[in-house]
Image (tube, rainbow, N blue to C red):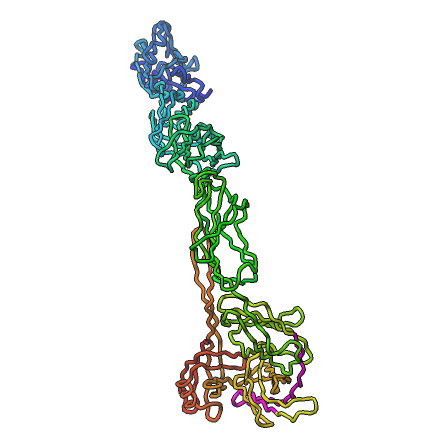
Amino acid sequence: MTLVQIASQELALSGNNYPGVALRATIWRDNSGSGVDAAANEEDVYAKVMLIKRGPSSAGTSSYNANGVCSASAVVNGSTRYSSGGLSYDFRSSSGRNETDTVQMLWEGWVAVPHASDGRKTLNYSAQWVGDSNLGSRSVSGSVSLPRITVAPNTPTATVATRVSDSEVTVGWAQTNPGHGTPTSNRIERRINGGAWADASTVSPTTSVSLSCSSNQRLEYRVRATNGAGASAWSAASAPVFTTPALPTAFTVAKDAALDINLAWTPNVGYTEHEHVIEWSGDGGSTWAPLATVPAGTSTFKHADPDPAETHTYQVRARATSGGLASEWVRSATVQLLAPPNKPTIPTIDAYQSKSDDFVLSWSHNPVDTTPQSAYQMQSSTDGGATWATGEKTATPTSAYTVAGGTHDAEVALTLRVRTWGQATSGGSDEMGASPWSDPETVTFKTRPVVTIDRPADGETWLEAELDVALGFTQSEGATFVRAVVTLMQGEAVLEQILTTTLASTKLATRVLDGGSYMLRVTALDSNGLSSVAAVADFDVAYTLPVAAGVGVTYLRESGVAQLDLAFPDPDEGEAAAARVTVTRAIDGGREETVIANYPIDDPTLTVLDTTPTIHGANSYRVRTISADGAVADIVELLETTEEWYAFLSTGEGFARIVSFHGNLKFDSSPSRAVALVVTAGRRNPIALFGENRSLVVSGSASLAPGVGSAPKEIDEFLLDAEIVCYRDPSGRRIFGAVSGSVSSPSSRVQEFRYRVTEAS
């Protein structure tokens, strides 16, 4: 217990003979709260009434007393708590009571103080002293506001939830509380689809609130009241309220072997208090009739023994078992139990077929009722459909009919049509479930063309390295040659296959080797679209190799050109003369590029200029001599270049027009590739999208001094005339593209050339 003084009143007594004494009344409260009875809405306070000596007096101190002649009273909260007469007082020095703040207690005690209904209380108190003429009389009074007493609110009752729409629910409750238990707020929780309780809202004290919701929910609510003293218990949960259930998905219908129809769907309702309602229609959905209602947890239904003469369309929806809210309908495809199929579909066929080969006619069975083909029947005509020959009904699920090879002569036009059956046994084109006849298709039989290999003939020895193929072609009904496929093989390996549209001469790119054995395989296509049987010719190769060239390679530094000096000696025994020459060049082990090709040899020597070799790297030259019959001999020479000062630009035919420059040469490159940066939600960094376009730009500068490299005027004229250029510099860089540049004169003797080359085709 901790008593704290909360009120005090004090007045000096009115007597003149014994001054310095006062009447004092105080009110005390237990600050620990143990004196408060919140349930009873009252608390205990402690009151004291006393006389107090506020200062010593020198006069009359020996007789500062009186016996049995005084009276006192105290009133607290409107009730007299103390009243007494015949009282004495004593503040004499001889009694040791003449010191300052000497107290003579008249009365003290606990007083139960009821609070007002709202828990508030203003406490009034007073005290009176009636003394003798020496000390005098006095009364004091005062008031003090006591802390308000509050209790936690009562538990709300009668919680009710009402659906307004699929997005709004109204929640109401009753609230009865004592005045000192009034709530300051109401907290509402909800439970969705049987899950955990979660906050829904906190509102000022009221008895109803509108809250948001969503479709496909089972909603329960509970409420509690709160104030500074605490919170009530949760109310009992409201009866559940339901919003519109989610519609089913993946609705399928299919008939089974017993001709029952099986329905299946995926339920999507969030709560168990639901069912699925099924209706069916026999007229494609114009009118509907109830079929079944199935409980929650069921996602299939079998429609047993439906009428096979009717079509069947179904719709299903979810419905809450409480309140009757229902989803939209979901409609199925239409099921036909048994009905004659539609006419079969024959794909487009080739107009001509080989009379000696089997001809297979296929079609697609087109059921109305989803049943597969059970039988088919063919009709054929050789007079354009004027008369028909009807075949037997064939029980088979196979949708194909074979006309055996040799059945019809060449030039016979055969027209065919087919009808099919499913499982229906009534109606249709024969009143027994047959489809209509298909659209007719006509095929004309022809004789296959014949192709022959006239050159090289089968068993022949071919005397050249280049293979020139000649073919023969015939077709009995006068069809013309369209094309042939020529395949060159060595053993099982295919060396080359080409398509040719000529018979007289087809040159193959593959060179056949001396001493080798090969096979040609040829098929031909005629104007009827028929292919021949493959013709085959086996042949051997025997020819004489040409004499190899003598080769010398020189680098011409002033122009950056490689000079090849070729010599063609007379052939020795077992060699053939060189009739043509081809020169290729590969840079630093890269792909070979042609310098000259099949150049005729008219003199024993030939000088060849390569105007675009690398000026810092390895140039590998292959010099190939070719005999009159196509045999080849190769010589490879290497030219290593180590240019460190000059750069070159070449243009014109054969890139033969060249300018050079080297003074104070500087150059750099700027490669780039097309890229786009795309900023997307949810990613910290943009996404880079790379394109196919690439760019390489080389820029540089050089000083032009008299007598060193090309003159400024020569470079000016080059820039004006240049089209595609080849740029080469001491780094080994070699690119083809477009050039731009300028020549300036920083001094009277030296001019500066600035250039920019952009790689291009």
Tell which of 676 and 77 is nearer to you.
676
Q: Is residue 510 left or right of residue 79?
A: right
Residue 570 versus residue 509 in the image, above or below: below
Q: Is residue 612 left or right of residue 309?
A: right
Residue 100 image-quadrant placement: top left
Task: State which region is magenta.
Answer: 538-566
Q: Mark yes or no: residue 236 visible.
A: yes
Q: Is residue 384 left or right of residue 562?
A: left
Tell whether position 675 is magenta: no
Tell which of 445 and 156 is nearer to you.
445
Residue 319 image-quadrant placement: top left
Residue 139: x, y in percent?
Answer: 30, 14
* Residue drawn at 53 percent across, 85 percent down: 645
Tell whether position 551 is magenta: yes
Residue 595: x, y in percent?
Answer: 54, 84
Residue 106: x, y in percent?
Answer: 38, 11
Residue 380: x, y in percent?
Answer: 48, 54
Residue 300 versus residue 719 in the image, above or below: above
Residue 326 image-quadrant placement: top left
Q: Mark yes or no: residue 251 visible.
A: no
